[in-house]
Image (tube, helix red, strand yellow):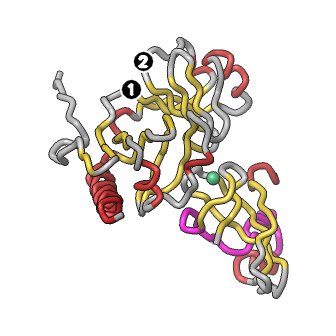
Amino acid sequence: MYLPCPCCGWRDMREFTCIGAADYCDRPEADAPPEAWDNYLHLRDNPAGPARDLWYHAPCGTWLEVARDTVTHAVTGSTAVEEAG
Amino acid sequence: MIELSASDPFAGLHLPLVHGAARLDSVPPVRITAIAPLPGQTEALASALGGFPAPGEVLDTTLRLVWVGRGQAFAFGEGLPEGLERHAALSDQSDGWAGAQLEGADAQAVLARLVAMDLRALAVPSSVRTLLGHLPLLLVKQSETAFDLWTYRSMAGSLSHELDRAMRMVAARRALA
Ligand SMILES: [Zn+2]
């Protein structure tokens, strides 16, 4: 499997670490209700189809959000988390 | 004050190694300064340095500037411009890295066994952060037949071991053909 690093281009999967669903990027506000924090920390969708994952490319130090399809295994793109804001 | 004496990271590892059409030797010690632009300072830094390398770039000014990661470059050599600390975080990395050059007609064939990248497609000069086997690697392509391979100093033994093995395998294949 190859993944596109926004910095380095397509690279072998062994260079990356998978952190999990990109939900980790959507951190609730500090005063959000417990339900929001419960959702953020523990609840995931497990989609069959398009999915957003958070990966880390250790060689260059880029955190990236990868768009892929869990049914077809197609990887359709990525963006640097830093640039996504 | 204690006077420390410099030592070769590849000491005792029997460099240079020569097998078939590939030769591995250590890169002579050189000052390495990591340069990370402070927020909003990349342009000012670039004009002070004569440029700042984009991903994969190697720029030769009075120093050699090598892209080494997101928002970071290494300057190889002495003589950083004065006042650079206003624009960037600087740290001396000279003792932290070990560099060896793999050179020869079979250099790419040797690296093809260890690095999961097509090195033929890269410009000369250019830089890549990747892995050599399990080792973190900064690769600088010097020519189609010469590659500088940098890893953390503590891994110099593993670097030369992996390359020694791959060089022997490629040479053995050539001998059979
Ligand atoms: Zn990268």
Q: Residues within 10 Å of mark 1 (few under 14, many from 20)?
A: some
The answer to which of A31 and A3 lies nearer the viewer is A3
Q: Residue at x 71, y 82 (%)?
A: A42
Q: Is residue A49 left or right of residue A63?
A: right
Q: Which residue is pictured at 82% across the width and 74% down the height?
A: A33
Q: Is residue B66 above or below residue B122?
A: above
Can the viewer see residue B162?
no
Residue B78 is tagged as 2
- From the viewer's perspective, tell me whether residue B6 is left or right of residue B177: left
Instruction: Quadrant for residue B57, please give it.
Output: top right
- To the question of a shared chain for discs 2 and 1, the answer is yes
Decide which of A70, B162 is in the foreground and name it. B162
Q: Which residues are magenta?
A: A13-33
Can residue B38 be seen in the rendering of this structure? yes
Task: Mark 2 and mark 1 in contact? Answer it, CB < 8 Å.
Answer: yes
Disc 2: CA contacts within 10 A as few (<14), some (14-19) or many (>=20): few
What whole-number distance in Å separates the C-alpha atoms at marks 2 and 1? 6 Å
Which amino acid is tagged 1?
Arg
Badge 2 marks a residue whose secondary structure is: loop
Number of the label disc, if any, that sits on residue A84: none
* Residue under the image location 70 percent in, 33 percent down: B39
